[in-house]
Amino acid sequence: MTQRYRIAIHEAGHTVAHVALGYPLHDIAARLTNDGGESRSLFDPEEEENFSDTATSLVAGMIAERLICGDMSDFGHYTGDLNAVSDICCRVSASEAKRKAFFDACIQKAKNILKKNKAALVAIADVLIDKGFISSGQVIGIIIDSG
């Protein structure tokens, strides 16, 4: 399995989570870059009511890698995601137990979303590998077709 494929799966995971959580996507929903990739939706991750969805979307990339590739990659492109989730957890509560419960709930939510949309996840990653980007219309079409 190539690094590029893992990155595509990772970014597809974020993208599927954005859609499943009800957030509209940018025209170019996801793309691969020379040093990784990005998934883009139209929600404000700084709004407190979005903390759970933001954290779920952030961990969805790593969960997608585990679901499709069997493990997470070791090239560290997810470090930024983990740092952002850690920051959110600290903003949610000062209690270590509450932060852990919040994090665990976001992990489970991402797992549920990605297992339900596994075919779409792989199809979106395939488009990313083939073209280097995917439009919001293509993402929605894939998710609808994957049922």
Image (tube, rainbow, N blue to C red):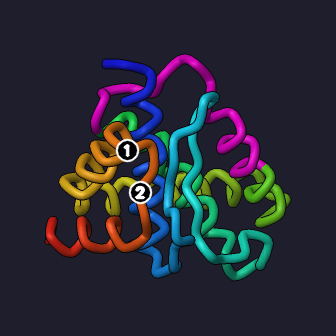
Residue 115 occupies quadrant: bottom left
Q: Report the quarter where the N terminus lies.
A: top left
Question: What amino acid does circle 1 point to?
Answer: Lys
Q: Does the magenta run of residues contain 69?
A: yes
Query: In the image, is 143 to the left or to the right of 37?
Result: left
Who's the residue at 44% across and 42% down the image?
A: 132
**Span highlighted in magenta in the image:** 68-86
Query: In the image, is 25 to the left or to the right of 42?
Result: left
Whether label 1 touches label 2, CB < 8 Å: yes
Examine the rendering and report whether any part of residue 109 can be seen.
no
Disc marking residue 131: 1
Position of residue 63 relative to residue 145, above or below, is above
Task: Report x, y in % for residue 126.
Answer: 28, 43
Who's the residue at 38% across and 26% down the image?
A: 71
Task: Report x, y in % for residue 3.
Answer: 44, 21
Who's the residue at 45% across and 50% down the image?
A: 133
Position of residue 42 relative to residue 55, above or below, is below
Disc marking residue 134: 2
Tell me the SS state at disc 1: helix
Task: Report x, y in % for residue 70.
Answer: 30, 27
Examine the rendering and report whether any part of residue 99 can be seen.
yes
Who's the residue at 32% across and 40% down the image?
A: 130
Position of residue 3 relative to residue 39, above or below, is above
Question: What amino acid does circle 2 point to?
Answer: Ile
Residue in front for this viewpoint, 33 or 107 = 33
Q: Residues within 10 Å of mark 2 (few under 14, many from 20)?
A: many
